[in-house]
Image (spheres, rainbow, N blue to C red):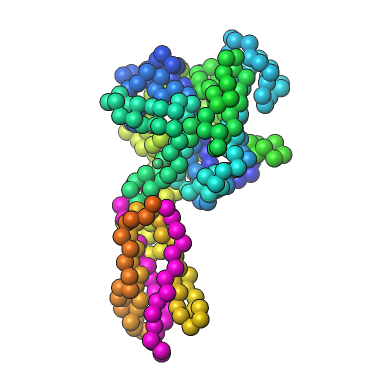
Amino acid sequence: METGAQPLILNEFNAVGSSRFLDGENTDTRLGRIEGNGGNWIELVVIEDHADVRGLELRWAEESTETPAQPVWDDSRPLMHQGVIRFLDHEFWSDLRQGTIITITESGMLVDDQGSTVVDGSDLQIDPGAGDWWVNVWSFDTDLLEVITNVPGDFEGNFSVGNDNWEISLFDSVGDLLIWGPIGEAYDGFGGGVGSDEVGKLELDPSADVTIFDYNDGTSSSFGAPNIWSAGTITQDFSLLREWALNGNGNGGGTAPLSIAVINGEVQVSWERLPGLEYELQQSISITAPQWERVSFYPMIMDDAVNHSETVATEPGQLTGFFQVLVSGPQQ
Ligand SMILES: [Ca+2]
Ligand SMILES: [Ca+2]
Ligand SMILES: [Ca+2]
Ligand SMILES: [Ca+2]
């Protein structure tokens, strides 16, 4: 179903009609039980670290009894509603971190069934140390997206997700190259018919290996969160994709990759500091067996990742070059 590298994959889409609810009294894990289950939204997962998706575009289509305007991407299906969601040349799209969940919402404001705000425009921040792996992009955010459709009465910024043989593909707009898709209930392999009280979703841990056979219809909805299925008894596992955030053993600790250089006779140790994690730079005082002692410590105060360099004071003749950085912090 795909060609080329997949920087991100489809994870979930909401086909619940605007005046419908999730079937079976079900609740979305973030939104609770709200009319329309959040309206038109799709959910993606970044599976390639530091992915640059500028210029890529999602192309969707859906059957309708309404006569659409001119096709916007597939001239061979002039009777279908169609749309394009293009990732613009914005810094955010140039460096996506692996394991991030990206939702794209048509609504700029979503409130859960308890009255708490879930979406307020775009949220482009992740904070792995604090368990925030979710970003939301509002489809009317014209700095980030170009969103066009041929649905009568819709405007730039509107898109549609529905239950009438809705489908979606990812294209590299340069050269019109299909990256993955189409994924949708009309295509062989998709798990089941998607109703107007259901979502469609990946029912497998996210990775580059997913195919259309791994997608299914269902009533377990998880906007901006790992997918759940089998009546909520199975949850997607993101731990492999998110290992980079700890660089360690997955138990809340490990060591960060270092680079060590001698600059003007001084030893400089550099590593990447990520938001929400603690770092302790250590130096060995023994050349035969590591005997670590603390050089410096950095608590969880970061808002953004930075490349951190530290010059380590050394006496003439003192051992240099035996360093490690311990990293620790909460894990999602
Ligand atoms: Ca966030
Ligand atoms: Ca259907
Ligand atoms: Ca169904
Ligand atoms: Ca989900």
Which residue: 50% across, 20% down?
162
In the picture, residue 286 is in which quadrant? bottom left
Q: Percent position (x, y) of residue 213?
A: 52, 32
Is residue 317 on the magenta stretch? yes
Whether residue 162 is visible to the viewer of this picture, yes or no, is yes
Which residue: 48% across, 70% down?
259
Q: Percent position (x, y) of residue 180?
A: 60, 36
Relative to residue 272, is residue 125 depicted above or below?
above
User: Horizontally, is 224 left or right of 159 in the view?
Assistant: left
Whether residue 186 is visible to the viewer of this picture, yes or no, is no
User: Horizontally, is 210 left or right of 325 in the view?
Assistant: right
Q: In which quarter of the image is the N terminus?
A: top right
User: Horizontally, is 110 left or right of 53 in the view?
Assistant: left
Q: Nearer the viewer, residue 36 or 254?
A: 36
Relative to residue 197, is residue 103 depicted above or below?
below
Q: Give the range drawn in magenta.
A: 304-331
In the picture, residue 118 is in which quadrant? top left
Q: Percent position (x, y) of residue 30?
A: 34, 31
The residue sitting at the left extreme is 114
Relative to residue 256, is residue 295 depicted above or below?
below
Which residue: 39% across, 38% down?
226
Tag count: 0
Q: Percent position (x, y) of residue 285?
A: 33, 82
Is residue 112 on the magenta stretch? no
The residue sitting at the bottom extreme is 317
Q: Which of 140 and 75 is in front in this view?
A: 140
Relative to residue 77, is residue 146 depicted above or below?
below
Q: Which of 101 and 180 is in front in this view?
A: 101
